[in-house]
Image (spheres, helix red, strand yellow):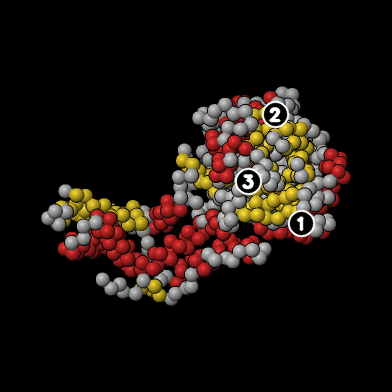
């Protein structure tokens, strides 16, 4: 049957093509820059823009573009998949393989391998982009580790942030290997693992800064660093070819809350003896100067508490123990009691106090259920929700869904965090609502309510000049962060040819005679949705996208395949597509169209049920597009009677 040519919605087409072109660019620029492989798939990802196209082509194109956008990471990894890189025990070399955290934010994980030994640094998660509908979290693809599970000697955790420990329950399910970390990290990891009952008893070993751990041919030294969570560390890994330093997330705080500055003397010592490779945090590489000291926030808090005669509610990241400590201290100074709200805040209080990282001022902490016993000007509530998460305590307070705290005039809300990129909208929605309620809201645009936990340019340069590494690999960041960090490396004397901008899955090999990339290993993202790990693929995501944008139309029909006749229906059901009562005409047209299409197919002698369904789906979808310019998911159900 000849299809009539149809106009595409020009705006929509333009938007899609733009998106495809952008993602193609994002995926291929690194490879092209390094002059390695030709971006053969670029053509596929960014098709030419036809002014007119028939329906099947439109659909095919759409599928292709959606796939390109949703899977740009995978595509980039696929480009590097050849040749597949495998360990070679005959010719041992140090192999450095990031499995997450490069050209993306979060899910940090790096593999160090030599001969028959592997150690893993961090096992982080990341939150899904908006195109990953319904996905709870994203974790690294650990196929490579599963394939070489007998070589994995341990997982070393730099600190307790989710982008460094979030994937641990899923990784340990596959690889029951020892985990090494500092006490606070261990406390928070244990809490997290206790939510996964199916895990075999995990082997968590607590180490403190200065400790060294033998793991196969490696020896891993814990070095104290400053960061926005306490007890963070960098690792100096002694390998058969030299020392590798992985900074993890760090900053240089000269006035730290716990009095423990980053161990610069030790780093300097390592530098003097010779560092082979430095892997360094790139998060703030674009920012000049130094990150401000955590103490600065204490001063701002003090200013806000001073003379305030209402209740004060402070929202912060729970894991920032030092911040929580400062809030307690300033509250105590002004004679206020402190209650906490939100599960992660309760957790950190428990673990932090138990392990001695939090010292609650005498007679300050009270139970949240008791806040009514105190006058409002004697109260402080520390809460989660600084990112506007819909289920969080502050969000519920804003939208009157909180059991103990009802925000109103006289309340002062301090948001002691900046919105993580992508969270701006929910955060500001929440702030608007808090203002509506009559509260006074102070957030980062108005005062220094937050300082970053990541090193800025001067700190990064200091690290480079202390360690004086032979090779340098910027870590943790999008491509631009990595590139800017690389330029700092050059400025600090690392030879340009010794700086390696890597990617997830890419293998950097180092031996006595030199260093260079050599192939890749499987890498990418694994999607976690509820109990399902890795069972959501691009086909499911495409369907979810279609459903979320235009709903679903179901064509249900009873047929007798032997007499080749329609016995009942077709019945048209719609969800999320159109309000049926106002579209009676369209519905009856659809019924007629479906009936005719079916009768045609049956008369022609088509026996394949899937071919019949496919024909009906296509005709109905095309008709709906012509009539409404919408593209719902169409599902035909054939009931044999
Ligand atoms: Zn961190
Ligand atoms: Zn991080």
| Residue in the foreground of this view, choosing between 300 and 270 | 270
Q: What element does badge 1 sit on?
A: helix
- Dot 3 or dot 1: first in sequence order is 3
Q: Is residue 146 left or right of residue 221?
A: left
Q: Is residue 386 visible?
A: no
Q: Quadrant of the N terminus?
A: bottom left
Whether residues under marks 3 and 1 lie with C-beta atoms below 8 angstroms apart, the answer is: no
Which percent across, then down, holds residue 559?
17, 53
Mark 2 or mark 1: name the one nearer the start of the chain: 2
Label 2, secondary structure: give it. Answer: strand
The foreground one among 354 and 340 is 354
Q: Secondary structure at mark 3?
A: loop
Mark 3 or mark 2, earlier in chain: 3
Residue drawn 67% across and 28% down? 205
Instruction: Identify the image quadrant of residue 175.
Output: top right
Circle nearer the viewer, 3 or 1: 3
Q: Check residue 206 in the rendering and tell me which mark sits there, or answer none.
A: 2
Picture residue at 63% right of the left edge, 37% below the top: 152
Tell me the residue that label 1 is attached to: 498
* Residue 244 makes an appearance in the image: yes
The residue to which callout 3 is attached is: 87
Q: Are marks 2 and 1 in contact (CB under 8 Å)?
A: no
Mark 3 vs mark 2, CA separation in Å: 30 Å
Side (left or right) of 477 relative to 52: right
């Amino acid at each position: 049957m000849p299809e009539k040519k149809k106009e595409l919605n020009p705006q929509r087409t333009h938007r899609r093509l733009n998106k495809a072109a952008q993602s193609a660019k994002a995926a291929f620029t690194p490879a092209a820059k390094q002059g390695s492989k030709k971006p053969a798939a670029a053509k596929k990802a960014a098709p030419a823009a036809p002014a007119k196209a028939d329906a099947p082509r439109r659909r095919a194109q759409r599928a292709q573009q959606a796939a390109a956008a949703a899977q740009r990471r995978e595509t980039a990894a696929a480009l590097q998949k050849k040749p597949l890189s495998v360990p070679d025990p005959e010719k041992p070399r140090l192999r450095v393989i990031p499995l997450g955290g490069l050209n993306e934010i979060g899910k940090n994980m790096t593999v160090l391998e030599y001969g028959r030994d592997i150690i893993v640094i961090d096992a982080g998660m990341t939150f899904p982009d908006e195109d990953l509908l319904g996905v709870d979290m994203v974790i690294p693809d650990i196929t490579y580790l599963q394939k070489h599970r007998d070589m994995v000697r341990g997982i070393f955790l730099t600190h307790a942030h989710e982008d460094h420990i979030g994937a641990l329950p899923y990784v340990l399910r596959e690889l029951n290997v020892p985990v090494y970390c500092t006490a606070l990290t261990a406390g928070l990891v244990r809490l997290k693992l206790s939510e996964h009952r199916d895990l075999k008893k995990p082997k968590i070993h607590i180490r403190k800064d200065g400790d060294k751990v033998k793991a196969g041919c490696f020896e891993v030294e814990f070095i104290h660093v400053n960061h926005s969570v306490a007890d963070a560390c960098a690792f100096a890994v002694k390998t058969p070819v030299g020392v590798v330093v992985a900074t993890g997330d760090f900053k240089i705080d000269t006035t730290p809350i716990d009095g423990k500055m980053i161990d610069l003397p030790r780093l300097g010592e390592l530098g003097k003896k010779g560092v082979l490779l430095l892997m360094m945090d790139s998060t703030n590489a674009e920012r000049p100067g130094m990150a401000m000291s955590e103490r600065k926030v204490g001063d701002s808090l003090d200013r806000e508490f001073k003379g305030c005669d209402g209740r004060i509610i402070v929202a912060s990241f729970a894991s920032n123990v030092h911040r929580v400590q400062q809030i307690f201290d300033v509250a105590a100074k002004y004679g206020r009691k402190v209650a906490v709200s939100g599960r992660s805040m309760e957790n950190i209080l428990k673990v932090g106090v138990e392990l001695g990282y939090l010292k609650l001022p005498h007679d300050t902490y009270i139970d949240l259920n008791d806040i009514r016993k105190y006058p409002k000007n004697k109260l402080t509530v520390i809460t989660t929700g600084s990112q506007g998460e819909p289920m969080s305590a502050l969000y519920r307070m804003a939208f009157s869904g909180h059991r103990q705290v009802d925000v109103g005039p006289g309340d002062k809300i301090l948001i002691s965090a900046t919105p993580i990129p992508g969270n701006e909208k929910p955060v500001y929605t929440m702030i608007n609502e808090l203002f509506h309620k009559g509260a006074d809201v102070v957030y980062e645009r108005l005062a220094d309510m937050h300082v970053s936990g990541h090193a800025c340019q001067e700190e990064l340069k200091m690290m480079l000049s202390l360690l004086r590494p032979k090779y340098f690999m910027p870590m943790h960041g999008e491509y631009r962060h990595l590139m800017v960090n690389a330029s700092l490396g050059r400025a600090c004397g690392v030879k340009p040819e010794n700086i390696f901008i890597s990617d997830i899955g890419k293998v950097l090999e180092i031996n006595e005679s030199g260093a260079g990339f050599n192939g890749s290993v499987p890498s990418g993202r694994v999607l976690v949705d509820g109990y399902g790990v890795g069972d959501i693929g691009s086909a499911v995501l495409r369907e979810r996208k279609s459903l979320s944008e235009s709903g679903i139309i179901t064509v249900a029909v009873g047929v007798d395949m032997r007499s080749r006749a329609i016995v009942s229906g077709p019945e048209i059901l719609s969800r999320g597509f159109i309000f049926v009562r106002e579209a009676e005409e369209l519905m009856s047209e659809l019924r007629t169209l479906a009936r005719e299409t079916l009768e045609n197919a049956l008369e022609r002698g088509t026996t394949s049920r899937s071919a019949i369904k496919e024909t009906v789906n296509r005709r109905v979808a095309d008709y709906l597009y012509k009539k409404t310019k919408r593209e719902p998911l169409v599902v035909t159900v054939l009931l044999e009677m």
